[in-house]
Image: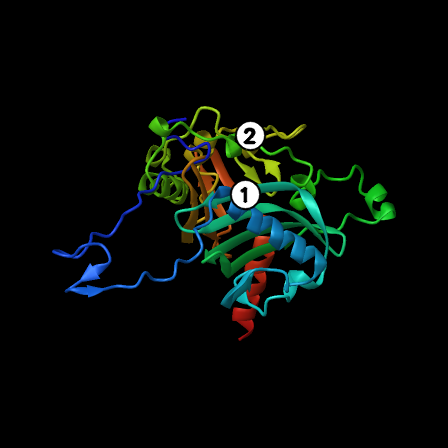
């Protein structure tokens, strides 16, 4: 795939420290040095993936005691610091079928995107684990619970049920084999190049400039379990962004309401498979109600955004 986005990854460098000048191994200034106790070997891919599976098993059992934890562990759920064992740990009733694991032996971190069930409701879980000496020192999670389907009577009154989105759509999805295939060493990009490729996508989205990013001809985006490119909406008339390619969507400025994508973090990079696991936030002003798309007069914000902005303006007028 070269340097084009279809999904990215990277190659890192290991740097060894030099011996002190004039000193032989095990000696310095004429004094013998006792060999320091050797810690456990760093985790490789298999080891890192094993930690994810251990975490999911413990989550389902509602029991943190079996996890290999560092003396101090930072745990967050949706950016909120919690005691480990709180939050999703209290309500997990099943582990879903969709599992994407991104391993980074160089940074001793591993990312996971998949599905679980919270009180029997399909739930999307994004997970990042950081290890120190083969013990978990950081746990970062993002949790999104799918809305329950409408009651049978209400669903019948409103016509055909809408297509599933979120975890309900992601759970039965087949994992794209591109995410699990090793890229030949001679074709790999450097770690820095892969981080730059990920950021280039969001630079292009912010500025509506497709020249800032390279897309593979077969690029597709999956959002909330739904393919949102090259996937026309049946029966839809007029503007249909899902019918466009990755590049054409940016050129059309259909994302112009996303003013800034910040913060951006790419903590986990799978060098062998050339995959970047990142966390990004779309900043969308609530009072940005209409914007111009190339070739179309205007596009309006979703109803919930317009309602939020209207409520905000009313509060201002009453204050």
Between residue 271 and residue 215, name the one nearer to us: 271
Residue at the (42%, 51%) spot, across then down: 267
Q: Residue furthest bottom?
A: 319
As measured in the structure, the alpha-carbon distance from the residue carrying label 2 to the one carrying label 1 is: 12 Å
Q: Going by the picture, which residue comes out furthest to the left?
A: 22
Kindly identify the residue that appears in the image at 57 percent across and 46 percent down: 113
Q: Which mark is residue 290?
A: none
Where disc 2 sits, the SS reads: helix
Identify the residue position indicated by label 1 in the image.
101
Q: Quadrant of residue 308?
A: bottom right
Screen quadrant of the N terminus: top left
Residue farthest along the top direction in this orientation: 217
Residue 177's tag is: 2
Q: Secondary structure at mark 1?
A: strand
How many discs appear? 2
Identify the residue at image location x=20%, y=60%.
27
């Amino acid at each position: 795939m070269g340097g084009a986005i279809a999904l990215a990854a990277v190659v890192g460098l290991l740097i060894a420290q030099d011996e002190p000048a004039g000193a032989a191994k095990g000696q310095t200034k004429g004094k013998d040095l006792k060999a320091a106790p050797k810690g456990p070997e760093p985790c490789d891919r298999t080891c890192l993936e094993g930690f994810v599976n251990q975490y999911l098993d413990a989550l389902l059992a509602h029991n943190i005691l079996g996890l290999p934890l560092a003396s101090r562990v930072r745990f967050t759920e949706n950016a909120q610091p919690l005691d480990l064992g709180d939050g999703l740990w209290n309500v997990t009733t099943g582990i879903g079928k969709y599992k994407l694991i991104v391993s980074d032996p160089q940074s001793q971190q591993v990312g996971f995107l998949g599905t679980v069930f919270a009180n029997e409701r399909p739930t999307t879980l994004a997970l990042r684990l950081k290890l120190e000496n083969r013990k978990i020192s950081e746990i970062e999670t993002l949790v999104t619970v799918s809305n329950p389907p409408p009651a049978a009577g209400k669903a019948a009154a409103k016509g055909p049920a809408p297509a599933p989105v979120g975890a309900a759509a992601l759970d039965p999805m087949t994992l794209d084999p591109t995410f699990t295939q090793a890229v030949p060493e001679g074709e790999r990009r450097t770690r820095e190049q892969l981080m730059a490729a990920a950021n280039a996508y969001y630079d292009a989205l912010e500025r509506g400039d497709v020249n800032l990013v390279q897309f593979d001809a077969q690029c597709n985006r999956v959002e909330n379990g739904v393919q949102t490119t090259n996937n026309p909406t049946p029966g839809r008339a007029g503007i249909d962004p899902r019918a466009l390619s990755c590049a054409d969507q940016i050129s059309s400025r259909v994302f112009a309401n996303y003013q800034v994508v910040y913060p951006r973090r790419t903590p986990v990079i799978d060098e062998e498979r050339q995959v970047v696991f990142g966390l990004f936030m779309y900043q969308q002003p609530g009072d940005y109600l209409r914007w111009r798309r190339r070739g179309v007069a205007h596009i309006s914000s979703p109803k919930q955004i317009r309602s939020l902005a209207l409520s905000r303006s009313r509060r201002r007028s009453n204050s």
